[in-house]
Amino acid sequence: MSAPIVLVPGFWLGAWAWDEVVRLLRADGHDVTAITLPGQNSRDEDRSRVTFADHVDAIVKAVKSKQDPVVLAVHSASGFSGYAASDHVADRIAAMVYVDTAPGKPPLDPDFKGDRAMVWEDVKKEENLDGLSEAQLATFRERAVPVPHGVVTGTFTFTNDKRRDIPSTIIATGFPSAEYKKGVEKGWRFLSGVPELRNLTWLDMPTSHWPMWSKPRELATIIGDVAKSA
């Protein structure tokens, strides 16, 4: 019997980003749910009132929807909202998996103006695209949805020490775990919660920043194994 799995996409993405991983996990017998965070359904929707707390609440709701404690897998910037959600429902999370991300402590960018749209030239310069096909990149560009301003600038106060004991795995894909650890020492914001964790495993899986597309089978195996042992 394995723990149910909740998958949370990063910036600009919806539940669709996890489709192949979901298929593989379900084929292996797992109870798995991927969610779309508020304001990320469509470019046309009104996201002017969506806040960081709304993203946290959506994750908490997904966790609570399962009868048993879950494996919560978060990707990229959802490391912030996922870690905040763990503060609310630490007892409902059997394990956390950070997919090319880490427990971040908001705000993500307190001075950012407006919604954060996906700027392709910036993505090409800043992110690892290894192993991604042209078709996958085209789909990404076509389906990317701006992240609400309130999510990027929102804050959160952590109060539950139990979150620190949740078994957590950081899967380093876009750059090695050794670089992550240097970033912890340098105080990178998205790594700010790492020193708080008391049960942390590091895994290296060199590939793109979006391993659900470039290495879905390998990623599904890791998440599934965590669920089986949770």
Image (cartoon, grey):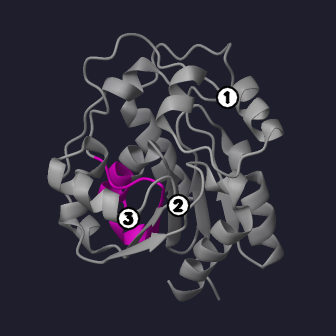
**Secondary structure at numbered mark 1:** loop
Q: Nearer the viewer, residue 174 or 50?
A: 174
Sequence order check, earlier mark of 2 and 1: 1
Question: In the visual, does 71 lie left or right of 192?
Answer: right
**Residue at mark 3:** 177
Rounded to the nearest angstrom, the CA distance separating label 3 from label 2 is 18 Å
Rounded to the nearest angstrom, the CA distance separating label 2 from label 1 is 19 Å
User: What residue is at 55 percent from the left and 62 percent from the top?
Assistant: 206
Q: Nearer the viewer, mark 3 or mark 2?
A: 3
Q: Is 206 a magenta residue?
A: no
Quadrant of residue 196 within the rendered picture:
bottom left
- Specify the label residue 41 is tagged with: 1
- What range is drawn magenta here? 83-104
Q: Nearer the viewer, residue 183 or 216?
A: 183
Residue type marked 1: Asn
Q: From what the image shows, is residue 25 above or below residue 101?
A: below
In the rendered structure, are the residues bearing label 1 and label 3 in contact, judged by CB atoms less than 8 Å apart? Answer: no
Within-10-Å neighbours for mark 3: few <14, some 14–19, many 20+: some
Residue type marked 2: Ala
Q: Position of residue 60 (x, y in %)?
A: 46, 52
Question: In the visual, does 11 lie left or right of 137?
Answer: left
Q: Nearer the viewer, mark 1 or mark 3?
A: 3
Q: From what the image shows, is residue 228 above or below residue 149?
A: below
Q: Is residue 155 visible?
A: yes
Q: Is 102 a magenta residue?
A: yes
**Secondary structure at numbered mark 3:** helix
Rounded to the nearest angstrom, the CA distance separating label 1 from label 3 is 32 Å
Q: Position of residue 38 (x, y in %)?
A: 55, 31
Q: Nearer the viewer, residue 226 or 212?
A: 212
